[in-house]
Each structure stands twice: as structure tokens, then as C-alpha cells.
Amino acid sequence: MEIEDLGKDVVEAHFYVRDSMVNSCVIANQKLTNIFGGDSSSIVKLFHKLPLLATIGWQMFRLYLL
């Protein structure tokens, strides 16, 4: 592999798609951390966590398929 080929992945569009998937997981994880720190009942926390967990799971699955 030549030195010019090393930076090729950064220029390609799929790198930015991957980066946005990881960023959405980070944002969902930060929201999960806020929910865990809240003082709501456990059933309310569960219903707030479910869409965030689904988001993280879906993004991880999409990353796996790349």
C-alpha cells in the first residue's frame, strides 16, 4: 500500500455516513445517562429508554453491515 492510499477512506462518502451513525449512538447514550440519573419511576424510565436503545441497536446493526 502506498502512502497516497492511506488517506483514501477519509475522502470517501461512506466514512462520513459511518461517522454520523457513531455520533447518533453517542447522543442516544448521553440521553440514556441522563435518564438513569433522573428521579422518575422505573416504568417511566423504561419507556424513555426503549426508543434510545432501539436507536443504538439499529445504528450498530447498520455499522456491522458496512
Image: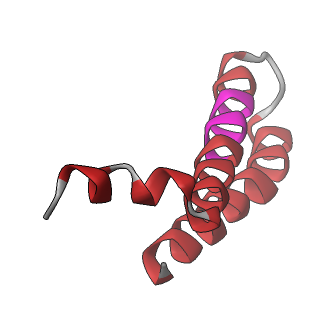
Residue shown at 74%/28% (left/top)?
Answer: 35
| Quadrant in the picture for the N terminus | bottom left
Position of 26 with respect to 6 (left or right) is right
Outermost residue on the left side: it is 1
Image spot of residue 32 (x, y percent): 68, 34
Q: Nearer the viewer, residue 37 or 31?
A: 31
- Relative to the observer, which residue lies in front, 27 or 65? 65
| Magenta stretch, residue numbers | 25-32
Question: What number of labels is visible?
Answer: 0
Please name the residue shown 42% across and 58% down the image: 8
Please report the residue visible at 38 percent of the width from the left and 49 percent of the height from the top. 7
- Does residue 45 belong to the magenta stretch? no
Q: Dominant secondary structure of the magenta stretch?
A: helix
Can you say whether 13 is above or below 10 in the image?
Answer: below
- Determine which quarter of the picture holds residue 57: bottom right
Pick the residue in front: 7 or 29: 7
